[in-house]
Every structure is written in C-alpha cells, then in structure tokens.
Image (cartoon, helix red, strand yellow):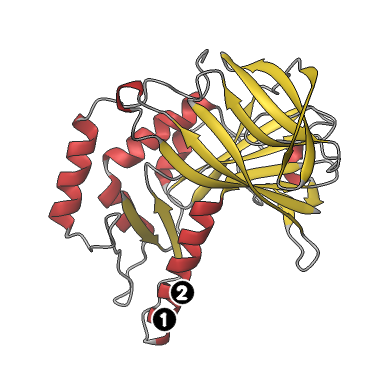
Amino acid sequence: MKTFFFLKRSLAFFGTIGLAFSAFAQEKDQALASVVYDFIHVTDTNKRENPKKESMILYLGKFMSAYKSKTLALKLEEIRKEVGEENDNGNKRKLFSFNSPNVSNDELFLNPQKQKLIRVDKIGPTAYQIPEDYPIINWKITNQTKIIGGYNCQQAFGEFGGRLYTVWFTPEIPFPYGPWKLHGLPGLILQASDAKNDVQFNYGGFKKELDSKVSIALPDNAPQTTLKDFMKAKAAFEKNLMFNQKALAPGNANTRIVLKDQTGRQLSENEFKEMMESRANEKNPINNPLELNK
C-alpha cells in the first residue's frame, strides 16, 4: 500500500544474515523471447470475490528463464519518470524501491540444465539470493488440444505444491518453461490453473525479443542466504521501517523520503507510522498460499 524512495546505503543490520556467494550468480543468458501472464490468486478463501491480480512476465533464454512482475516494472517506470522530472528541478534523489502487498517484489531464476532455482528478493534496496528446491513435476500429457493466442496447444496434468494443475503448452514455441515454477514440458506453457481455479495463469501475449537485448542474470554481488534468515531480517527491518529508510539516506538537504499510499496520496510520517502499526496488528489474510504443502 506504499511507495518508497531510497538513496542507496548498506545497513549494519544486514550483517545478522548468514551470507554466502553462489557461482550461479555469475551465469548469464540473453532473453530470446518473453511471454506475459495474467496471474489470479485467491489468497483468502473467505473473500473469493477479491483475488490478487497481477501481470507477470517470463523471459526465455537458451538455458535460463526469469519470472517477475510486469506490474512492478510498469510502476517503477512511472516512478522513474517522476523522479527524473524532480531531478531536473534540483532534487537529487537517485535510487528508490516500491513495495505493495498486491505486487510481487521477488524474481525467480530457473536453470533446468543445472536443476537450480534461485529466488531474488529485497530488503530495502538490497537484493539477496535465496536458493529453493528445484521443482520436479511428473507431467501426464493427454490428447486434448486447443488454440490459445493462435498457437496449437496440448493439455497436461501435474501435481506441484499440493495442487493439481491443468496446463496447456505449445510445441510451436520450443521452450521448456512456464509461469512461476511450472516447467518441464516439450513446449512453452501458455495457460495453467489448479483444480479449484484458486490459482490461474492466463496467456497475455508472446514476443520475440529482437529489438532489444534483455539479459537474464542474477544481480551482481547479491549475497546468498536462507529463506528463514531472510524473513527474520525483513521482519526486523519493517518493524522500524521509517528509521531504516532515514538511515539509507545520506545527510543531504536535497534528499528526502516520499511515502504514498496506493492512490498516490502522500503520507505524513505520523500517517505512515499508524498505517504500519495497523498492518502489524492485522492477522495474515493469506490462508491459501500458492504452495499448500509448505
């Protein structure tokens, strides 16, 4: 529900995270194409009429893929233009971060050849690598076919994360990738949904990346940590979020932190503090996570 602008500076607080560096971070691939998915997730089964909706994008490389929020990318581009205009007026803010409960801030990097899955997430502006178990799905391909977006698709079933998924893949786009952690078929997955339609990935468009060079690579010098350590550190950071934001900004009279709610209204420091206290007191509304068996 909020937008933050940061100037980049490391916090001693992050030293409490167990860190390592991965050789996977040095691997790079070039995106040959991309596919957009309209993602729908019923996070709260008591409020099925209000699912999470987000536009996601999957970049397809020769041996790697990267899955991230297109909604976030568009929001960041909007903020960049705003910051650029303010910089022209003498305001020297340079680096920022956007955070909202309705937007995915993490990215997934998949390498089937090495059977590796790396999640990248941030605490403030600092990115971390979080290795996850490589998803292995035993697909059952059927003879059912249909056309999606002009492509001939074939049906397949597979279990993952405690859900039974029905997917439609097309051998006409010979990439073994799909949305989120769904992958491993002889063609790109264009559509997927679980048995209850609580989770849906609907095809939103395919594009060959011929007019630009998009790299698929983990952020340089991003340390590796465990999910447990990351979540612990993130919770501590958010507990004193306003203080940590100020710690990130150097003592420059032209530097300030701007806080906005989802409507774009700027918040005072007291309003922001009240919002964070209210959020901390709320019960977790996610009773239907993507992976039911975690």
Q: Position of residue 255 (x, y in %)?
A: 33, 72
Comparing 241 with 139, the one in front is 139
Comparing 35 with 133, the one in front is 35
Q: Tag on residue 81?
A: 2
Compute the Cα span from label 1 to label 2: 6 Å
Q: Which residue is mark 1?
A: 85
Q: Are marks 1 and 2 in contact (CB under 8 Å)?
A: yes
Is residue 104 visible in this depiction of the protein?
A: no
Amino acid at dot 1: Glu
Q: Residue furthest toward the bottom?
A: 89
To which quarter of the image does residue 178 belong? top right
To which quarter of the image does residue 165 belong? top right
**Residue 154 falls left or right of residue 129:** right
Mark 2 neighbour density, 10 Å: few (under 14) some (14–19) many (20 or more): few
Q: Position of residue 279 (x, y in %)?
A: 23, 37
Up/down of 255 relative to 243, above or below: below
